[in-house]
Image (cartoon, rainbow, N blue to C red):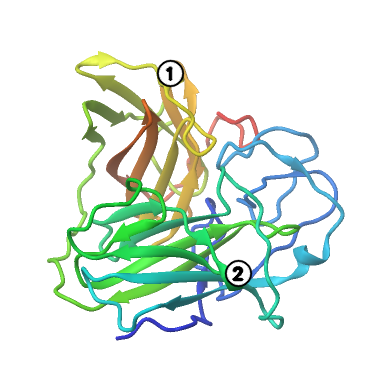
Amino acid sequence: MLIAGCISALFSLAFMACGHDAPSVTTATATAGGYICPMNCEKGKTYPQPGTCPVCNMKLEAVKAPAPASKAEYFTAFSSSVTPVEAGKSAVLSFTPKIQGNESALVPLDLVHEKKMHLIVVSDDLSYFDHVHPEFSEGGAYQIKLLEKGKDFTNGSGKNEIRLDKGGQYWAFADYKPTGGMNIADKIELTVNGTKSTPVVYKAEKRVSNVDGFTLSVETSKYGELTTGGHVHLPISIKKDGKPVDPTGFEQYLGEKAHLVLINTETKTFIHTHPMVEDGKLEASTTFGMPGFYRAWLQFQTEGKVHTADFVLKVAEETGKTHDYPHDHSGH
C-alpha cells in the first residue's frame, strides 16, 4: 500500500481533549467574548474569567473578534519524495496545511511551544514513538527527513529527522495553529513497506518507567483512579539514583517543564497535556473520553538532554462517581 500523495480524508482530533475521532476536516471556530484555551482543548468552550485550561494547563487567552481565518476549514496534505516509502531507506516527508476550497493559499502558522508544527509519530501498536518538528520549505510544506537505517542524526534526535526501520502502519499527529485560527491536530496514516515487527499488545499497566538514571512513577491520585466522564489527575513522582528529585529544577522543554502524550491503544485517541509542578512532583490533569489502555510518554529536559519515559495506563468507564473537585481552570 502506497502512502497517498495527498490525504483528503484525514482523521482530525481536537488537540489534547477529545475522546473520539472527528470528521475529516477540522473547522477552527470560537465564540467572541470571554477566555479560551489557545490549543482549543474543549472545542470552542469559553470561560468568563482568565485562568488556565483544565485540560492542558495552558493560560487562557482572551477571545478576539472572529478573524476570517477562524472560519476556515483546514486539512493537512501529505506527500513523500519517494513512493512507496521503504523501511530503513531515506525519504523526505511533507505536511502542508491547506484551506478547504482554497487549497493554493499559503497558511501562515503561529509559534506554539516554540515551534510552528509539532509531529508525533507512532507505530500502530504504539511500541514506537517520536516527537519531531518539521521545517518550513517552499510551497508552504513542513518537512521531516526519513533517515536510512544506521545513519546518525544530523543534530540529535527530536529535531526534523526520524527513523522508521520496520515496515507497517504508522500514525502521524500533526498539530499547529493557523494565524487567526484555533489549534488543529490531524491524524495521518503512514504506510511503510518492509519487514514488520511482531505487534506488541498492551494489556497490563506499567506505572513505573526508568530512563537515563531517573525512575518515574505514576501514583494513584488523591481524587481516585483513572476514569472517563470527568477531570482526572496524574501525579508523577521522580527519583534519580534512588533519591527524590524536585522537577522544579527541570529545564524548560518547548516552553513547559514537561509534556505528556497519551494515545488509546484501540481507538488511537490522542491527548496532549502539560504537567505542573505540585508538592515536589509533576502533576498532569486531563479528561478521558474513551476507556481502555493508553500508552503514555512523558518528556522532560535536564542538562540539555530530553528524556522520554513511557507508561501504560488503564482508564475505566465512569460509573456515576461524583468528583469532589472543581472542573474549572485552576490548573491543578
Estimate the x, y position of residue 114 in percent, counting from the top left. 57, 43
Examine the rendered structure and indicate whether residue 53 appears above or below residue 138: above
Examine the rendered structure and indicate whether residue 275 appears above or below residue 28: above
Image quadrant for the N terminus?
A: bottom left
Identity of the residue drawn at 36% across and 39% down: 298
Question: Label for residue 77?
Answer: none
Residue nearest the observer in this picture, 26 or 42: 26
* Among numbered discs 1 and 2, the one appearing first in the sequence: 2
Estimate the x, y position of residue 327 in percent, counting from the top left. 61, 37
Label 1 to label 2, Cα distance in Å? 38 Å
Residue beneath disc 1:
249
User: Is residue 315 among the parts visible in the rendering?
Assistant: no
What type is the residue that disc 2 sits on?
A: Gly
Query: Mark 2 packing: few (<14 Cα in 10 Å), some, or many (20+)?
Result: some
Q: Which is more foreground, mark 1 or mark 2?
A: 2
Element marked by disc 1: helix
47 horizontally vs 12: left or right: right
318 horizontally vs 295: left or right: right
Residue nearest the observer in this picture, 233 or 39: 39
Residue beneath disc 2:
140
Element marked by disc 2: helix
What type is the residue that disc 1 sits on?
A: Gly
Disc count in the image? Answer: 2
Estimate the x, y position of residue 331 in percent, counting from the top left. 59, 31
Estimate the x, y position of residue 167 in percent, counting from the top left. 21, 72
Identity of the residue drawn at 37% across and 81% down: 3
